[in-house]
Image: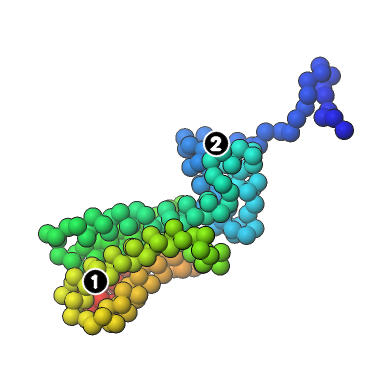
Amino acid sequence: MGAARTGAGRRVGRPRAAQRPDSGLEPREELLAAAAELFTTLGYAATSTRAVAERAGMRQASMYHYVSGKEELLALLLESTVTPSLAYARDLLADDTTPAERRLWELCRADVGVLCGGAHNLGVLYLLPEVRDERFAGFHAVRAELKGAYRQLIAATAAGGALPEGALDLRTDLVFGLIEGVILVRRSDPERSVSVSVFAEATADAALRVVGV
């Protein structure tokens, strides 16, 4: 059956996807923003590529000009929670003029700021069973490098440097777990009245106590 026509003979096709208010974002960034919202509210499995495209104000077919699909969107969102902190960690490791204790505190504070500073709690995506798949190896690689930076900074502190190898690994696991644990704290109380900066500083203080500083 052919497509319907108006009285003037103009073909009536499918309606255009509803446009979001102009955000000034590029299409790829618009898709990431839409995916962040839907993945953290509806859930990853329950969100279709069509829903993401429509939320971004484009057709599903147009979406594939910018990303390969829902899986790539998830990978990009996951990596966005780590790469800013990793870049900062590299700078801190290269700084040999500031005490390691201060650099470790700064990394903890900044990392919590990244995890809690966005409009959506992207850290909850870490808990998805799909994330364990090797398809997300890029995320796991940058996360492992970030954890390694934590270990180096802990080892450079007076307290961390006195620890045997196994104990150093344990302290690193505990500190890294504490920092990523803010994801669950934020999920349990999304309307927390404490500002992100105060929360980040309190978590950094606690992390250094775990190390023994």
Neighbours of disc 1 within 10 Å: few (<14), some (14-19), many (20+): many
Tell me which label, 1 or 2, sits earlier in the chain.
2
Residue drawn 74% across the image and 33% down it: 14
Name the residue beneath numbered marker 2: 21
Please state which of the two labelled residues, at mark 1 or mark 2, is closer to the viewer. 1
Nearest the camera: 133 or 203?
133
Tag 2: residue type?
Answer: Pro
Tag 1: residue type?
Answer: Ile
Percent x, y of residue 36: 52, 52
Q: Is residue 68 above or below residue 156?
A: above
Percent x, y of residue 125: 51, 61
Residue drawn 58% across the image and 51% down it: 70
Classify residue 141 by image quadrant.
bottom left
**Label 1, label 2: how far apart the Cα atoms are:** 46 Å
Residue drawn 59% across the image and 59% down it: 43
Classify residue 41 by image quadrant.
bottom right
The colour mode here is rainbow
Side (left or right) of 20 relative to 177 = right
Residue drawn 32% across the image and 57% down it: 86
Q: Which mark is residue 154?
A: 1
Classify residue 164 by image quadrant.
bottom left
Q: Is residue 19 above or below residue 33?
A: above
Label 1–label 2 contact, CB within 8 A: no
- In this view, the residue farthest toward the left is 97
Which element is circle 1 on? helix
